[in-house]
Image (spheres, rainbow, N blue to C red):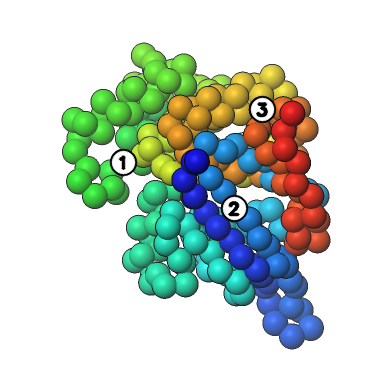
Amino acid sequence: MSRAVAALRGVGHGFGSGPRRRTVLRGIDLDLRAGEFVALTGPSGSGKTTLLTLLGALRVPEAGRVCLLGQDMAGLDAAGLAALRRRIGFVFQRHHLLRSLSVLENVEAALHALPGAEPRRDRAAALAMLEAVGLGGRGAEPTARLSGGEQQRVAVARALVRRPALVLADEPTASLDGGTGRAVVALLADLARSQGCAVVMGTHDERCLDLVTRRLHMEDGMLRQTEQAA
């Protein structure tokens, strides 16, 4: 059986106070296991992004329990949460590449903050990951020379080069055309499967849902529907 990556029980979260209080997540229960590629769908404002930030250890829930990679978030201080985030890969709608760095340097940068970083080994890992995403031989190029889809491939390489146990992708195809977006999601699925990590992708893109192993649908801050992919 694949190992547990995340477990959420009765998770609730909101913003503001008093009459301006807005509850965003209500009683979320969720289990994620290694090797899963989960699509998180739902209308804007349904709570998808807030749930992704909790799974990314970017915030602590107001209610309920979140265990990530075997650690209960409630027992972690700021340093512990930061260490946990280093074991998670992030792919955003906007790739957030550093324009002052080359393609290779952008991928290498993800490794510099890890304990025991070693320049020669890190460069080799970054080069291998660029090869895996189809950008081998282009590491010296400025990121501005790449197309939108190629830049998102660099973002995928940056997220996966650390060999994370969990990858979170928030609308990774939103700024891409249909064919390019599907190619990026297929690449993410293939690389994640080969690395044995769990992937959660928040998306509105119905054209990519056949590539996932499970679909979760959010409505009014609750997981109202669970579908196994065909």
Amino acid marked by disc 2: Asp
Separation of disc 3 and disc 2 at Cα? 20 Å
Instruction: Determine which residue is flagged by label 3.
Output: 211
Which residue lies at the image location 65% right of the left edge and 34% below the top edge?
213
Closer to viewer: mark 3 or mark 1 = 3
Q: In which quarter of the image is the C terminus?
A: top right
Q: Which mark is residue 45?
A: none
Q: Mark 1 points at which residue?
A: 111
Q: In the structure shown, which secondary structural element does the residue marked by tag 2 occupy?
A: strand
Which mark sits nearer the N-terminus, 3 or 1? 1
Q: Residue furthest bottom?
A: 18
Q: In this view, does 89 lie above or below 61?
A: above
Q: State the mark number for residue 31.
A: 2
Crowding near pointer 3: few (<14 within 10 Å), some, many (20+)?
some
CB-based contact (under 8 Å), mark 3 and mark 1: no
Which amino acid is tagged 3? Leu
